[in-house]
Image: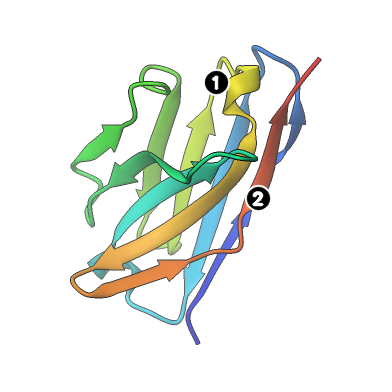
Amino acid sequence: QVLLVESGGGLVQPGGSLRLSCAASGFTFSSYGMRWYRQAPGKERELVALISTTGAMTHYADSVKGRFTISRDNLKNTMYLQMNSLKPEDTAMYYCNAYTIGVDYWGQGTQVTVSS
């Protein structure tokens, strides 16, 4: 059974930090590229960041570049998103996604709310 379980979301003040985790099981984690997406109320889901199978290549949305860092630990089957200098516009449900040719797995999401 494939599982992607996100954790680490919560309520944080503007300028604060959070670290999201995505724990994977049921598939060969190291063979899949990984992505973080987010979806705010009334908006389409958007790609936040992605990381290659080995972690050698990463890509970020312009809106988070310089503030967020994606990483992965293939020994722990876990992906991370370190989010610093959070802004109210970062408020959204954050989802992790595992992908390879013809296959997409999704987690259930973790809520991030940035508010004073």
Q: Tell me the SS state at disc 1.
A: loop
Closer to us: 1 or 54: 1
Q: Residue at horizontal 36%, vertical 63%?
A: 98
Image quarter of residue 114: top right
Up/down of 52 relative to 90, above or below = below
Up/down of 96 relative to 77, above or below = above
Residue 110 placement, left or right of 105 = right
Residue at far front of view: 42
Residue 32: x %, y % from top left: 27, 65
Residue 44 placement, left or right of 19 = left
**Image quarter in which the C terminus is found:** top right
Read off the residue under disc 2: 110
Q: Residue at horizontal 61%, vertical 40%?
A: 42
Residue 12 placement, left or right of 71 = right
Judge the density around disc 2: few (<14), some (14-19), many (≥20) Cα neighbours within 10 Å: many
Up/down of 110 relative to 107, above or below = above
Q: Which amino acid, mark 2? A: Thr
Read off the residue under disc 1: 84
Of label 2 and label 1, which has the lower sequence position? 1
Residue 63: x %, y % from top left: 41, 21
Q: Which amino acid, mark 1? A: Asn
